[in-house]
Image: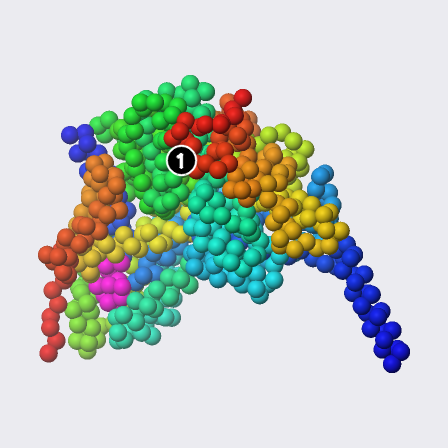
Amino acid sequence: MDLALTILLDGLIYASWLFIVALGLTLVFGVLKILNIAHGSLYAIGAYAAASFVALFASLGLAPEWSLVAMLLAAVAVAVVVGPLLERGLLRLFYGRDEVLLVLVTYALFLILEDVTKLIWGVNPYYVSEPYTLFGNLEFGSLFYVGYDLMMIVLAVVCGLGVWFGLNRTVTGKIVLAVIHNEEVSASMGVNVNRVYVAAFTVGVFLAALGGAFTAPMISVQPGLSVGVIILSFAVVIIGGLGSIEGAAIGAVVVGLARAAAVHLMPDAELFSIYIVMAAVLIFRPEGLFQRVSARKI
Amino acid sequence: MAFIRMASCAAALALAFGMAQPAQAQETFKVGIVTFLSGQAAESFGVPAWNGGKVLIDALNKGEAPAPYDTVGFGGMPIQTVVVDEAGGATKQVQELRNLYQRENVDVVIGYVSSGDCLAVAPAAEELKRLLILYDCGTPRIFEDGKYEYVFRTASHATMDNVALARYMKTQGVKAATVSAINQDYAWGHDSRTDFLAAMEQLYPGFKAEADLLPKFGAGQYGTEISALVRQGSDVVHSSLWGGDLQAFILQAGPRGLFKRSQVVLSAADHVLPSLGDKMPDGAIIGARGAYGLLAPKSDLNDWFWKVYQDAYNVYPVQAPYRMVQAVLGLKVAVEKAMAANGGRKPTNEEIAAALKGSEWHSPAGTIRMALGDGHQAIQQTAIGRTRFDEGRKMVVLDDIQNFKAECVNPPAGQKSIEWIKAGFPGAQCD
């Protein structure tokens, strides 16, 4: 029982981190049909920005609790600055082209952003570990868990519900869904498709940056952050079905639990476990668990 | 016609005279430096290593290093450097090595943190008959599996680190009936785990190996692994994690009580102490892959190096700069020895190689001896200590430091490391 609880908690904590990042990836794909490899770099930029903002807030003499606000503001700042810049300045030039070309463009963007990150923040690591202790420790079974890790589960649920509610229960969300289903008809009905693209991409950037920002306190922020997260995020959205919020949630939980079970029961199979799950899903559901139904155009 | 004959004769005499002269002041010694300037190993090893190299080479070129290194440059020749980023993989590094030799015309290349890069570039340097000094990489395989004339490594390989850890635990009376391990899932992590467990088998016969975790390099998130280690509750948890991985592991494991439940032993951890500060739990047993930094022996040379490094970078030197410095000093000794033997001319590759082979020299970390690999692989003393955050000095200090002679923790010449450990350390001189 103790082991089962441990695997469940470890799996959910890992899944929450993955879900926040994968949610942005799947949203961008759903709206813009871009498999954005640079999403990992945006995660890293979020982590760096959070490190800078937290240090700035500390230098202003604000209480440690304000570091949470600093991390949130860092993610917003990255989204507001980088999102429209990339979407309007680069990606829009390739809309309508082969999707493979867009993958290559975002890969090039990934490489450029890696160097831009080094140019701005250098190669030395940044530490913002103070927020990590803000929520204390909690005891579950025979183990202590850091409250901050558990807070990540809450954050992931808030992000997931927020995006779902925004898309399904607001007028703006309905417009976005209309664009997802058919941008040409939406445009003919008076929808400003360009604005929807900018907004969707910016929200995607925000979610990547938010994942990075709230991960920053538990790691040393340094070059190389972006590669691991993008590979895992791809696994999550492929398992869940590209473009599906529910799929990203289920995919993240499946990956998180599979990894936790492997570490506790069969450590040698840890890395393998994620990809065997992905392969198993794709054998039976080649388009993922929650592939969005799309109307066939005549 | 007479004028032409006279001019030719004068030119020939001048040429012959010039060849017999000591290295001229304007002649330089060009060194290619290859180290990680970007990527995950840059902050921990590559950049601080080159920082150490810079302050030393600056001082050598000004003749301001302490004796016996107080002559200018290498035998009067100013040292010129070309620095290359090690990031990009082994294939790229082989190409960069060729560029350094054939386009930049460097006299010697000093470099490489990654074991994979070391294994890839060594045959290339040998093929070109150009001098290569490996200053860092940990794999014992270079000279245990291969034989080279032009390739040297001026630091001990990784076997020393894990043998010293196990010996320290034994002499300090650390209880180790059960042992768990967490190491990166690549050659370094696997080799470190193998060496440590083999050494434990000799010193703690019958100990029980429990959790054996191999997270991927750069994992960043260790919550699940920490749960597994805490649940297991082994007496000892061993790790060779380094850099950002080690920092993240310590930041996440500290609050969850791993360091209180188990004795954590870390083979290569000194480089994270300045940045972690009070986040580094007390009582961890750590090594520095040599008697480096806080573990370095007291000497005028070490005091000098510590001061110039700290003045330049506002942080004390850790393992990587020490290893770069001992490589540069070893090369200086070899070049000047070769020059003393050839009448003071700039020495050839072969002359430097002959001088460096089997040599020994004094470094800030103690004496370095090229004792293994037919005189091409160094051994050196090392030390292990326990962490404690000193509130007064606002820094982590090391207590209970124990020094180990090079001959105690390194295999003897002609024997493979793992075979030496499994045979019970025959020939080890620990007294």
Note whether B155 is above or below B9 in the view shown.
above
**A150, A67: nearer the viewer:** A150
Q: Position of residue A187 (x, y in %)?
A: 21, 75
Q: In this image, A58 relative to A254: left or right?
A: right
Q: Which residue is mark 1?
A: B418
Q: Position of residue A217 (x, y in %)?
A: 38, 42
**B430, B148: nearer the viewer:** B148
**Chain at numbered mark 1:** B
Q: Position of residue B337 (x, y in %)?
A: 69, 45
Q: In this image, B7 relative to B260: left or right?
A: right
The structure residue drawn at horizontal position 27% and vertical position 70%, both measured from the top left corner, is: A100
The structure residue drawn at horizontal position 61% and vertical position 59%, both measured from the top left corner, is: B106
**B196, A68: nearer the viewer:** B196
Residue at the farthest right position:
B2
Main secondary structure along the magenta-highlighted residues: helix
Does the segment drawn in magenta span residue A32?
yes
Note whether A218 is above or below B177 in the view shown.
below
Q: Position of residue B303 (x, y in %)?
A: 65, 34
The quadrant of the rendering that contains the N terminus of chain A is top left
* Residue A158 visible to the viewer: no
Identity, as a three-letter code, of the amino acid under mark 1: Ile
Q: Which residues are magenta?
A: A25-35
The quadrant of the rendering that contains the C terminus of chain A is bottom left
Note whether A121 is above or below B9 in the view shown.
above
